Amino acid sequence: MSNDPLSSNDPLSSNDPLSSNPPLFSIDQVRFDGQGLVPCIVQEWNGGEVLMLAYMNRDSLEKTLETGTTWFWSRSRQSLWNKGETSGNVQRVRQLRLDCDGDTILALVEQTGPACHTGSATCFTDRPLGAPDSFAAKPGVKRPVETGAKGPGIEAPAHPGRYAGSRRPGVPTPPFLALPDLYATLISRRGAPPESSYTARLFASGPSAIGAKVTEEAGEVVEAAESGDRAHTIYETGDVLYHLLVLLARLDITLSEVWEELDRRKG
């Protein structure tokens, strides 16, 4: 497409709330407890699944940084252990994040094989507390409304940066956050003046015009695929997803609603 909304022609500006980032942390900022430990939540980089919870001390954190795989402190054996050292189910670290209080670490990893010693993909597999839909059915609990600029269905204050923890230049966004992150960006621009960006002009053009762009870009994906050009197919797919998310945001359709529809079709 000639006017690529994802290129430098329409960047996230310096005053865009999604472009701000917390500073990188150092080991000295980690608040280890009285036993010299800090909990580490391990999450899958690609799919977003929460894999396990373990504990690190300073030595294991340093070895994690040194080797690029997760190391923990075994409280039962009182020794360091490298996840997957014997099973082969290693965790390649993609990012480490420190929480706002400095007393919990999040490790985003690429998991090889199952994460749990039982052979399950995660340590939190199929053991819900209560019925699976018990919380969804609670009376008086409303679905959170997507936040952003004023418009139909927008009831909460804008906070589009909730998915933007890795907007720092050179620090990639985990794949499982890519679509929510982009959707949040779009929501933040929904009420912006049309002249401010390509995205704002799309919103102002209305559903029919946006839908026409979705159709156009989908055709370009097919053309790229038929030509056997893998890189161009990926590029054009990005354009389709972008315009489709603009259309969803314009119609006040959230990603959660789409995921629920896909989940309903299982089986």
Image (spheres, rainbow, N blue to C red):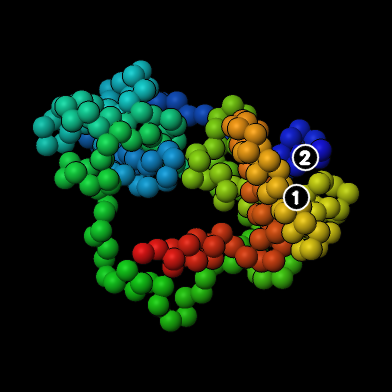
Q: Residues within 10 Å of mark 1 (few under 14, many from 20)?
A: some
Above or below for 219 versus 261? above
Q: Quadrant for residue 155, please give it.
A: bottom right
Q: Residues within 10 Å of mark 2 (few under 14, many from 20)?
A: few
> Whole-Å distance between the Cαs marked 1 and 2?
9 Å
Above or below for 232 versus 124? above
User: Most extreme residue toward the top, as rendered?
Assistant: 66
Above or below for 19 versus 63? below
Asked whether the beta carbons under mark 1 and mark 2 sit within 8 Å of each other, the answer is: yes
The three-letter amino acid code for the residue at tag 1 is Glu
User: Dot 1 corresponds to which residue?
Assistant: 216
Q: Which mark is residue 1?
A: 2
User: Most extreme residue toward the right, as rendered?
Assistant: 195
The three-letter amino acid code for the residue at tag 2 is Met
Mark toward the viewer: 1 or 2: 1
Q: Say what secondary structure mark 1 lies in.
A: helix
Q: Residue at x 48, y 62 (%)?
A: 262
In the displayed structure image, the side of residue 12 where residue 145 appears, left or right: left
In this view, the residue in front, 33 or 180, is 180
Q: Which mark is residue 175?
A: none
In the displayed structure image, the side of residue 182 where residue 209 appears, left or right: right
User: Most extreme residue toward the left, as rendered?
Assistant: 77
User: Most extreme residue toward the bottom, as rendered?
Assistant: 139
Q: Residue at x 55, y 32 (%)?
A: 172
Name the quarter where the C terminus is drawn. Answer: bottom left
In the displayed structure image, the side of residue 72 where residue 77 appears, left or right: left
Q: Is residue 81 visible?
A: no
Q: Say what secondary structure mark 2 lies in.
A: loop
